[in-house]
Image (cartoon, helix red, strand yellow):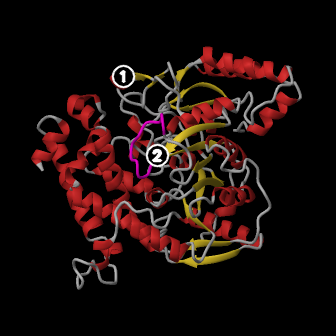
């Protein structure tokens, strides 16, 4: 399946081969022909055609065009747009009509993007499988029977299906990177605080970030550049020689043989590019899983306190169970978790980024897990299922670091993705390195036959 | 626990919800209060000879290494 990129769409728009309105019309026809709304939650054609016509008129008149002029996009259903419905993946009673527009959408509008709808998500962005109690689960286009990942499930699926070149998601514990890895697309979680959260659904203030899921690193960095207000470069630059760290073993010991082989392939590719490879003990990252979870659940239960008390039965079983976990978290436990975070930040700065410019970690232990094994988890199984899917993404979340999820290999069972993580503010460097590692979307099982 | 769940859910918890909260409390003991990252060297103002001596001085809302 070929993905649609921003550069390819803009080339067609610039040569006059197509128009923004024609692209949108084609999109509408493709979505209608599929006969299902999934992975969309809502389609908003009227406003989208107005935006597309405005973009076409500006192009005809030779007026200045934004960096995303005419590019069709859709986003996770959690961003406010004045006068439009936002649903958060929740029960219909949770929907609201927004009274203002989120700065991230204003920035995309100003850049000329055409916003035509909202994408499915896990209920209130809580859940790494992509299963939604109220609306089901969008189908993973890269892994038959596999979960699409969450919570930005629709964003990952829409990009993975080649419907849009990029879609916004949010990431609190892995919600951009997990669906990116499951669907074989790029996911870029920025540093904490880089992208404004106003007008986006809150979940955990200490860890919430907004960013793109995209068809390529180039697409992801162009969108991140816009939504960060220009703090990130939209284009790559030649890399200097870097020190790139891999875990010595304890943190990644649970990965599959083929993920181990993908890591080895990547080490070889980086060495071939002339970078210095550094082997570090990142075992303490494993000790961040529970602190990250405690902070997320305690803050999420605070966000949902009134609604949960007033109408607990409108929450799906798994989300209600996760919020009930908060009863087992005392104030001291929450504050201790935050102290652990602070201690881990200092250790990461000294022990990891004192010795390396960037770190490479697995995204998941293997390809996307099969849905049947996960979506029916109940009771105390839920916490273990969530830990299993987010074990490798939690450190980047609790430490507030920028992380890019990149598919690096395609097996017959689906894509394998790695994470490139750096210190705060290293988004440009991460994207520059990621662009040198991008691979085609072809199965390469034979190349990964031998574990490292 | 029962009280916390009542306050959280606005009703008496089910057996499953009670089990989830109890499981979480056990995870907090192991993953937070006994977290290896808390075993800091150094003296703190409150427990100078304790295992977590320096922890007492760690501001939970700092962003020190950011």
Work out how far the residue at label 2 is from the one at label 1, CA to CA, in angstroms: 28 Å
The picture places residue A320, in percent across and down from the top left corner, at 27, 39
Measuring 44% from the left and 43% from the top, which residue is drawn there? A129
Q: Is residue A421 above or below residue A217?
A: below
Residue at numbered disc 2 = A370
Q: Answer yes or no: is residue B23 visible.
A: yes
The picture places residue A32, in percent across and down from the top left corner, at 61, 17
Residue A231 bears which disc, if any?
A: none
Q: Closest to the observer: A295 or A136?
A: A295
Residue at numbered disc 1 = A92
Callout 2: residue from which chain?
A
Secondary structure beneath dot 1 equals helix
Measuring 47% from the left and 33% from the top, which residue is drawn there? A78
Secondary structure beneath dot 2 equals loop
- Callout 2 touching callout 1 (CB < 8 Å): no
Q: Closest to the observer: A252 or A35?
A: A252
N-term mark: 2 or 1: 1
Q: Main secondary structure of the magenta part?
A: loop
Labels 2 and 1 within one chain: yes
What residue occupies the far right of the structure in this picture? A15
Q: What residue range appears in magenta?
A: A198-208
Position of residue B3 in the picture relative to residue A270 (left or right): left
């Amino acid at each position: 399946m070929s993905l649609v990129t921003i550069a390819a769409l803009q080339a067609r728009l610039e040569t006059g081969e197509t128009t923004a309105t024609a692209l949108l019309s084609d999109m509408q026809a493709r979505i209608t022909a599929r006969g299902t709304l999934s992975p969309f939650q809502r389609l908003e054609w009227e406003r989208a055609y107005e935006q597309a016509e405005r973009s076409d008129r500006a192009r005809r008149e030779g007026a200045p065009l934004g960096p995303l002029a005419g590019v069709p996009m859709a986003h996770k259903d959690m961003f406010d747009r004045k006068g439009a419905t936002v649903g958060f993946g929740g029960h219909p009673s949770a929907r609201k009509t927004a009274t203002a527009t989120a700065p991230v959408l204003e920035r995309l509008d100003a850049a000329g993007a055409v916003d035509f709808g909202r994408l499915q998500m896990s209920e209130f962005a809580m859940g790494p499988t992509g299963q939604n109690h109220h609306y089901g689960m969008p189908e993973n286009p890269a892994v038959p029977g596999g979960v699409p990942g969450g919570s930005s499930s629709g964003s990952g699926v829409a990009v993975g299906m080649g419907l849009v070149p990029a879609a916004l998601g949010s990431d609190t514990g892995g919600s951009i990177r997990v669906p990116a890895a499951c669907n074989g697309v790029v996911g870029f979680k920025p540093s904490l605080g880089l992208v404004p959260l106003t007008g986006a659904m809150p979940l955990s203030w200490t860890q919430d970030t907004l960013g793109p899921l995209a068809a390529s690193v180039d697409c992801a960095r162009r969108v991140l550049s816009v939504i960060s207000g220009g703090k990130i470069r939209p284009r790559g630059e030649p890399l200097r020689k870097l020190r790139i760290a891999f875990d010595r073993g304890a943190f990644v010991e649970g990965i599959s043989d083929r993920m181990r082989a993908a890591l080895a392939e990547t080490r070889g590719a980086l060495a071939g590019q002339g970078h210095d490879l550094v082997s570090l003990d990142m075992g303490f990252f494993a000790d961040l899983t529970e602190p990250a979870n405690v902070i997320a659940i305690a803050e999420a239960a605070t966000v949902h306190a009134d609604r949960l008390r007033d109408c607990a039965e409108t929450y799906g079983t798994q989300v209600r169970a996760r919020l009930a976990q908060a009863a087992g978290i005392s104030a001291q436990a929450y504050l201790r978790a935050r102290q652990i975070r602070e201690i881990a930040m200092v250790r990461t700065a000294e022990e990891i980024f004192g010795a390396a410019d960037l770190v490479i970690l697995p995204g998941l232990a293997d390809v996307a897990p099969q849905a049947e094994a996960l979506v029916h988890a109940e009771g105390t199984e839920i916490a273990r299922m969530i830990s299993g899917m987010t074990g490798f993404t939690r450190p980047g979340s609790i430490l507030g670091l920028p992380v890019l999820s990149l598919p690096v290999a395609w097996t017959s069972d689906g894509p394998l993705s790695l994470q490139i993580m750096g210190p705060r503010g290293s988004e440009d460097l991460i994207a520059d390195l990621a662009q040198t590692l991008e691979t085609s979307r072809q199965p390469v099982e034979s190349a990964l036959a031998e574990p490292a | 626990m029962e009280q916390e769940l009542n306050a959280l859910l606005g009703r008496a918890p089910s057996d499953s919800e009670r089990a989830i909260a109890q499981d979480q409390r056990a995870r907090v003991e192991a993953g937070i209060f006994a977290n290896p990252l808390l075993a800091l060297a150094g003296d703190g103002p409150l427990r100078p000879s304790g295992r977590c001596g320096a922890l007492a001085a760690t501001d939970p809302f700092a962003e020190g290494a950011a």
